[in-house]
Image (tube, helix red, strand yellow):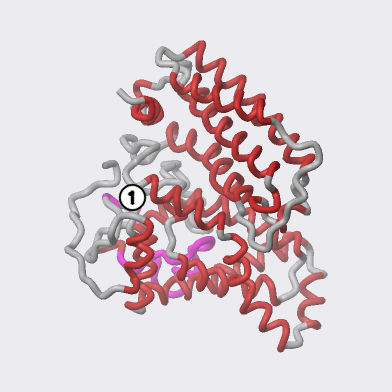
Amino acid sequence: MSFFRRLKDNLDRPREERPFGSGWLSGSGALLAGITGMLLVVVMHYPGIFQTPDLQEFVTLRHQQWALQVVLLLGYAFALLSLMLSKDRILGWTALGLVILASLIGTPDDGSSYTAPLYFGLDFFIINALFVGFLFIPLERYFPNYEDQTVFRPEWQEDMFYYLVSSLLVQILTFITLLPSNLITTYTDLSAMQEWIFNLPFLVQLGIIMLASDLVQYWVHRVFHMVPALWRFHAIHHSAKSMDWMSGARMHFVEIAILRSMTAIPMFTLGFDPAAIQAYVLIVYFYSSFIHSNIGWNLTKAEPYVVTPRFHHWHHGAEEEAIDINYAIHFPILDRLFGTHHMPEGRWPEKYGTAGEQVPRGFMKQFIFPFTKKQLPPEDTDQTPAE
């Protein structure tokens, strides 16, 4: 058996074969720490190419060095623990090798001075994918809704690639996102409203941002379902046949540009404190992963007030009752107000995907798909999310 096949099989080990104390959790954590450490080293040696300028103000070289030390220390500790506990030590040895390699490469003394007009947000990818994965993978493995679903479930490579592409193209996406807001503030005098909103308490501002953004996103989201030409872009997002923390990243570039630019208008035109905006952005990144995740927590008491994984999973369901429902991202009351709320008591969808037209596999085929008129055969509706 090849090295990578052994590694994959160990990460996808069934739940009954990875009880607490088996070394699986420590080995998986060590592997994630090793990968994170290697990527941090790349970012620190080439910040002009791989670091997001907006993050440099808050995440300095000293912060990165401190983070690397913590990550490598955790990697060493988890790898050694896994080697002591596990019978098949491939996770521990692989993680230990990555951690040692990152340690040998080390960090630059004062950072690279090389800058480039175009940068790629590798640091953003580390924060957006690996650290989020560090949080959600153990939660999904120990509190799963679909117990047979593995870490490397079908199509995981595509969703991770979407994470990578959207992170590396953060410069272009940020420009597109802010373009409508910049045009509005350039040609419209909103100074009185901006001053009033800026002076509101921090938590009040954060609440307004969440509600205003969710209201805009609700209708943009609904239009993507109602207009056939736009649905072909949004169908990419719905094509995932399994739901987990990565599946939310599967979005066509055109949809990202439209959705983000529209939902950003209230945030960047009404005069909110930048700290409140940054807090909201942080919440969104974690919350998006949470509502797509394969976490089967019973959140019945919270469901009337905030969007939960079960609420959003119904939006992704392929059953007839799941079509065109639950558009809200934060507050289900919007769906109640506009007649699109659906939450069958105690039930989750039985299958996911696009009910009808099949979306092709692969990033490039999916990128081209909305621009073609070719009709593909219907999906196999017998496929279950655990496949």
Q: Position of residue 168 (x, y in %)?
A: 56, 55
Q: Quadrant of the N terminus?
A: top left
Is 16 drawn above or below residue 232 in the view shown?
A: above
Is 241 drawn above or below residue 204 in the view shown?
A: above
Dividing the picture into quarters, in which one does residue 192 lie?
bottom right
Q: Residue at coordinates 54% horizontally, 72% vertically from top-left?
A: 215
Q: Residue at coordinates 77% horizontally, 50% vertically from top-left?
A: 113
- Residue 203 appears left or right of 312: right
Q: Position of residue 256 (x, y in %)?
A: 50, 66
Compare residues 199 and 99 and report the one nearer the observer: 99
- Residue 31 appears left or right of 11: right
**Residue 129 visible in the displayed image:** yes
Q: Position of residue 154 (x, y in %)?
A: 32, 44
Compare residues 377 and 194 and report the one nearer the observer: 377
Q: Is residue 336 magenta?
A: yes
Dividing the picture into quarters, in which one does residue 194 lie?
bottom right
Q: Residue at coordinates 32% horizontally, 58% vertically from top-left?
A: 239
Amino acid at pointer 1: Trp
Magenta region, residue range: 323-350
Judged by its main secondary structure, the magenta piece is loop
Give the crowd class for mark 1: few <14, some 14-19, many >=20 residues within 10 Å. some
To which residue does mark 1 refer? 348
Q: Position of residue 109 (x, y in %)?
A: 80, 36
- Tag 1, which secondary structure? loop
